[in-house]
Amino acid sequence: MTLDIEEIASLLLIAAIVAMIARRFRLPYTVGLVATGVALAYSPAVPRIHLTKELVFTALLPPLIFEAAFHIRWSDLRRNLGVILLLATVGVVISAGITAFGMRAIAGWDWTAAVLFGVLIAATDPVSVIATFKEAGVQGRLRLLVEAESLFNDGTAAVAFSMALLLIGGSTLSVTQVAGTFLSTVLGGILCGGAIGGLVLLLAGATEDHLIEITFTTVAAYGSFLIAERLHFSGVLATLTAGIVLGNIGSLGALTDRGREAVVSFWDYVAFVSNSLIFLLLGVREAQLNLSAAAGPILIAIGLVLSGRAVAVYGCLIVFRKSEMRVPAANQHILVWGGLRGALALALSLGLPANTPRREEIITVAFGVVAFSVIVQGLTITPLLRRLGQITPPSEPTVRASGNPDT
């Protein structure tokens, strides 16, 4: 990938216009971007910047994770941590297992392809989920559950995918070794993010210049991710931890009032830019694939992914039905239908080794599932939220939603 400033500027101009149109007609911004990306693919000016695993993981995903984590209050997260962690671990395993078994039994895929696809498509994607729920104006516990789960299960899926590649690649690892590697990857990412977040807070406390404070948070967002990945830890969990540390401890005085306001505004804009580029390039990439040739496996996969998500959510949340952490049935329905797939699944599929069985078919089916998720689920989630009384009618003013064009 080469950085073409002219193309990036053009894409951002298009994104801004799409945002204005989407807001005027009350359409999901992400759906408008994907549709525009498809149209761009058939125009003479096709962007030379392509959606790749490196672009998503290195440039676009860290700021989105950091921005979302920065706004999560630790007190709220702690009260709901049991629900979030169960969905982000056991829920991901259940969803991946159902999808993998179904692709093997119904679609006729070999176990290698079925397992890899099941793992990479299992987690809800923070890019799609957070963008959609911010646009809808969702607040309170429901938004916390949706956003935090998508952030945590993102890290779980990425780590599980790496483990699956090792096992399928012929590595002879025992159950104990797999569990140990998984835990070290997760804990290493959390410790790395906490250490970098703490260091940045110490540095930020020595200045009152809001521009320097913004710079420090940028270093924390990207530095935690890149250092963790270099050490073979979870970069997603590192950035998530750094964002939570800076967002909570920074509010206690490590960041000045002006600095915190500037940091929030800066990351709102960076999130808007990252979302815009991801969904525009997603549309361009989808138009370049022959999705109709894989219509059968795509339809099977969509059904399996939705079924796996439903079993995971309803099954896991039964545990809390008689406790203070009980999640109302209406919110469970939203968690199921609002579990969108997006850039994470595509990045993982694009990063599959060249010799992976059914590699191109996995990529095509993954894009098909994501297209359904972003367009169909994205278009219907807001009416569902309104029907279940989770958001105000469109005629009423909505509250602030950071990182999106309706702010």
Image: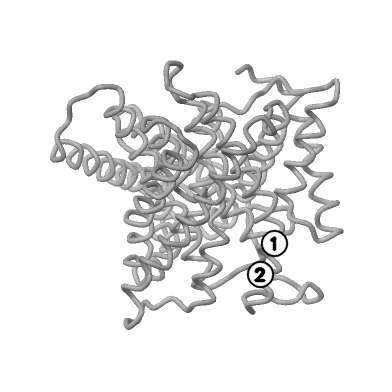
The residue located at (66%, 35%) in the rendering is 282
Name the spot of residue 307 as percent of width and height, x first.
Answer: 49, 57
Name the spot of residue 134 as percent of width and height, x first.
Answer: 63, 60
The residue located at (68%, 76%) in the rendering is 387
Query: How many callouts does the rendering have?
Result: 2
Nearer to us in this view, 208 or 166: 166
Mark 1: which amino acid?
Thr
Secondary element type, mark 1 = helix
Name the spot of residue 354 as percent of width and height, x first.
Answer: 46, 16
Mark 2: which amino acid?
Leu
Q: Could you tell me which quadrant the N terminus lies in?
A: top right
Q: Mark 1 points at which residue?
A: 380
Horizontal arrangement in the rendering, residue 379 relative to residue 265 (left or right): right
Q: Is residue 327 above or below residue 200?
A: below
Name the spot of residue 345 as percent of width and height, x first.
Answer: 51, 39
Horizontal arrangement in the rendering, residue 237 relative to residue 370 (left or right): left
Q: Is label 2 in contact with label 1 (beta carbons under 8 Å)?
A: yes
Nearer to us in this view, 211 or 105: 105
Asked which quadrant contains residue 364, the reply is top right
Q: How far apart are marks 2 and 1 (CA)?
A: 6 Å
The residue located at (34%, 34%) in the rendering is 228
Q: Could you say which disc has been placed on residue 384 in the image? A: 2
Q: Is residue 90 above or below residue 292?
A: below
